Amino acid sequence: MAAAVASSPPIFLVGRVKQTKAIVCSQFKHLGWVSGVLPPSGSVLPKPSKLLKRVLGTSRNTPVTAKAGTSINELQRCIVLDIEGTTTPISFVTDVLFPYARDNVGKHLELTYDTAETQDDIELLRAQVLEDVEKNVVGAVPIPTHGDREEVIASVVANVQAMIKADRKITSLKQLQGHIWRTGFRSNEIEAVVYNDVPEALEKWRAMGLKVLCAMLFHVHPIGAEANFWQYELRNKKETKSYQEISESLGVDDPSQILFVTDVYQEATAAKAAGLEVIISIRPGNGPLPENHGFQTTNSLSEMNPC
């Protein structure tokens, strides 16, 4: 499912929500970094080195029909949500986000070429391509260090197109894609989608006093505006170390006080190995699970209730 995300900070967005078959968040406004803003009363502040940012969500909506009865242990203080396949349809990523980045990479570079952010993106790609050329990776074209603007942009576009075609899961590509998607949200060319049950679940958990984090996938968060939620960057969601770092950042007494919800078996296994409680999300289009996988499952976040 999810690739390792880029190491740059997440983008903080709010938006109005309109209802369709799933929730569509449109007319986003970019707010950038939220510095000096305290979390809800009683929350534990993360370590500064962990990219934990405040995100606003949500609106009220009617949940989709789903199986009831999945429980949240009363000792759990935090819920960590995966995005793709849990809060957001996988098809939104494959059918909307990926094609948008592919088709707009040249335009994005032309508009932002002189910014420090884009120069950082290019430098990260240049280092990756240098490694790719040495390994004879198909489609790798050296990115000039001192070439003119158009030459650099053309070589970056060629490499990005080849990386996307090969479905590569690398930080340099994900970082640039995230910045392109952000531009798409700002201009309302992209409307983000979440499942109908997500806003209701977030409201309910907030009312219960639970801290909710979203393990971000694409630097932008499609949940909406109003309530206090958090966003966390997982560098590799299939490594146990990532979940150990989350536990340390949240300051819980025991990792089992954190509930992680994901659609990916390997991520669930890694989180369980770190001591987190895990529930697997069952959504249309999600990948199959192994037989006898041993995890609780849910078809709807709003049906996850306290014991």
Image: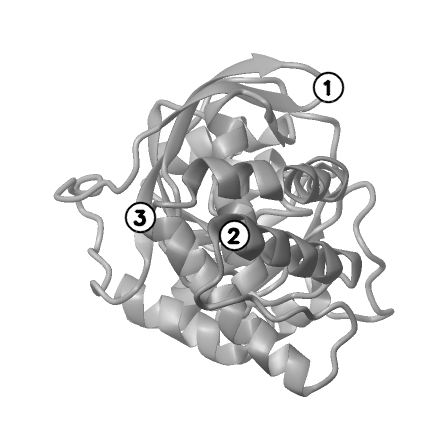
Q: Nearer the viewer, mark 2 or mark 1?
A: 2
- Mark 2 surroundings: few (<14), some (14-19) or many (≥20) residues within 10 A: many
Residue that lies at the very extreme toward the bottom in this rendered image? 134
Numbered disc 2: secondary structure: helix
At label 2, which amino acid type do we have?
Leu
Residue at 30% over, 37% down = 32
Contact between marks 3 and 2 (CB within 8 A): the answer is: no
Numbered disc 3: secondary structure: strand
Q: Mark 3 highlights which residue? A: 53
Q: Is residue 135 left or right of residue 292?
A: left
Q: In which quarter of the image is the N terminus?
A: bottom right
Q: Mark 2 highlights which residue? A: 176
At label 1, which amino acid type do we have?
Lys
Numbered disc 1: secondary structure: loop
In the rendered view, would you say 297 is above or below 168?
A: above
Where in the figure is residue 155, as x and y percent of width and height? 62, 58
Q: How far is mark 3 from mark 2, CA to CA?
A: 20 Å
Q: Which of marks 1 and 3 is nearer the N terminus?
A: 1
The circle on residue 21 is 1
Q: Which of marks 3 and 2 is nearer the N terminus?
A: 3
Q: Nearer the viewer, mark 1 or mark 3?
A: 3
Contact between marks 1 and 3 (CB within 8 A): the answer is: no
Question: For the image shown, how many numbered marks are present on the structure?
Answer: 3
At label 3, which amino acid type do we have?
Lys
Where in the figure is residue 12, as x and y percent of width and height? 36, 38
